[in-house]
Amino acid sequence: MELKLMMEKLGAPQTHLGLKSMIKEVDEDFDGKLSFREFLLIFHKAAAGELQEDSGLMALAKLSEIDVALEGVKGAKDFFEAKVQALSSASKFEAELKAEQDERKREEEERRVRQAAFQELKATFST
């Protein structure tokens, strides 16, 4: 669904079968999904001339291509700086998620310790 929405936003909408074909072409681990590594593989294959000219992957690669002759070095620099910022934002989001998960684990461990202490105290008074 994310690939479908991205292709629509880039102005190159694909059919369901076209999207499946795109994923299948670079899906190295055969999970039916695109990992970040597999997504990057699209651009590597495009640069190496390994994609069919009429494939959705080639359309995606061309849409995100920067022509330095046309855009100039500053345009390419801005593009890559925006990409780096997007990646760092994703890393920040991942760090926040990990912190939340760690906090939940810590709270769960504290709950287990309190419950064990309560059971021990309960056993002391039960005998």
Image (cartoon, grey):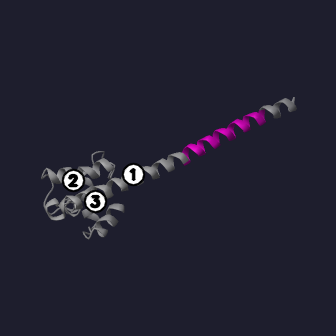
How far apart marks 1 and 3 lie (CA) works out to 15 Å
Residue type (three-letter) at the residue carrying disc 1: Ser
Q: Nearer the viewer, residue 17 or 82?
A: 82
Q: Nearer the viewer, mark 1 or mark 3?
A: 3
* Residue that carries the numbered disc 2 in the rendered image: 43
Span of residues in magenta: 100-119
Residue type (three-letter) at the residue carrying disc 2: Phe
Which residue is located at x 50 percent, y 46 percent?
98
Task: Report crowding for label 2: few under 14, some 14 to 19, many 20 or more residues within 10 A (C-alpha).
Answer: many
The answer to which of marks 2 and 1 sits earlier in the sequence is 2
- Of helix, strand and loop, which one carries label 3? helix
Task: Report crowding for label 3: few under 14, some 14 to 19, many 20 or more residues within 10 A (C-alpha).
Answer: few
* Percent of width and height locating residue 123: 82, 31
Q: Nearer the viewer, residue 27 or 35?
A: 35
* Percent of width and height locating residue 85: 36, 55
The answer to which of marks 2 and 3 sits earlier in the sequence is 2
Which of the numbered marks, if any, corresponds to residue 78? 3
Instruction: Give the prevailing secondary structure in the magenta stretch.
Output: helix
- Of helix, strand and loop, which one carries label 1? helix
Q: Is residue 39 above or below residue 53?
A: above
How far apart marks 2 and 1 lie (CA) works out to 20 Å
The answer to which of marks 1 and 3 sits earlier in the sequence is 3
Residue type (three-letter) at the residue carrying disc 3: Asp
Is residue 122 rendered to the left or right of residue 70?
right
Q: Nearer the viewer, residue 109 or 22?
A: 109
